[in-house]
Amino acid sequence: MEIPILITDRLLLQPTSFDYEAQRWQAVNNQVTHYMTRHPPQSIEEAQPFRQLCIDENNEGSNRHRDIVSPDASNRYGAVDIRDIHSSLPNVGIWIAEKHQWQWFAYEALSRVVEYYFSHYATSLVYTVALENTASQRLVEKVWWRIVIWRTWVLANKWLPTIKYIIKKK
């Protein structure tokens, strides 16, 4: 299944591939994996099966995983994905490598992905944020004004206080 590259003023949002494996691995640290998994990979080789899963899910059409890269595709800034795109309430997630944070890449990428999916698939999305991750909370609250919030306690298969935002199409 062909997945279009989404473009913003400063970013390309292209289907996940193995092209940026070294940059991806350099960006993995406890800050990133704290919110994503209980068992972070210990080597680039351990991370590759997950990357293959993302590629397979893109090909199957169940999820959309994208690398966030520079316009010349030389630098990878992070990733954005939408899971369960054909469900009544798909999940959107994003992460930006620590050295690229605070440059509005998350805002730009998330805005473009949500705009695209609202025009092609969904009318609502779920965005789950750890309660302690106030930067991500501010991000979603800035981008969309039609949100419903509820609290839960599970993220990345572990107990972690979270907030689930329901982002509604305007």
Image (cartoon, grey):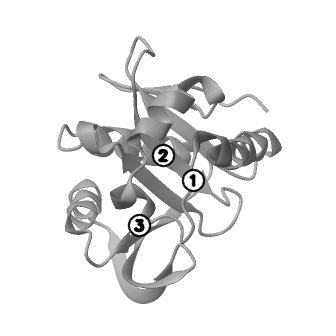
Which quarter shows the C terminus?
bottom left
Q: As rendered, which of 65 and 76 lies closer to the eye?
A: 76
Count of numbered circles on the image: 3
Q: CA distance from mark 3 to mark 1?
A: 20 Å
Tag 3: amino acid? His
Q: As rendered, which of 42 and 6 lies closer to the eye?
A: 42
Q: Is residue 119 above or below residue 62?
A: above
Is residue 43 visible to us here? yes
Label disc, if present, on residue 82 of the rendered structure: 1
Q: Is residue 84 left or right of residue 135?
A: right
Which residue is at the far front? Answer: 42
Label disc, if present, on residue 80 of the rendered structure: 2
Residue 4's quadrant in the figure? top right
Q: As rendered, which of 124 and 18 lies closer to the eye?
A: 18
Q: Tags 1 and 2 in contact by the CB under 8 Å rule?
A: yes
Label disc, if present, on residue 54 of the rendered structure: none
Residue at figure coordinates x 66%, y 41% from the top left? 45
Q: Position of residue 75 (x, y in %)?
A: 39, 22
Q: Is residue 94 left or right of residue 144?
A: right
Residue at figure coordinates x 30%, y 23% from the top left? 10
Decide: few, some or many residues near mark 2? Use Cα within 10 Å; few <14, some 14-19, many ≥20.
many
Q: Secondary structure at mark 1?
A: strand
Q: Is residue 156 above or below residue 33?
A: below
Tag 2: amino acid? Val
Residue at figure coordinates x 73%, y 47% from the top left? 49
Instruction: Say which residue label 3 marks.
Output: 34
Tag 1: amino acid? Ile
Nearer the camera: disc 3 or disc 1: 3
Is residue 120 visible to us here? no
Decide: few, some or many residues near mark 1? Use Cα within 10 Å; few <14, some 14-19, many ≥20.
many
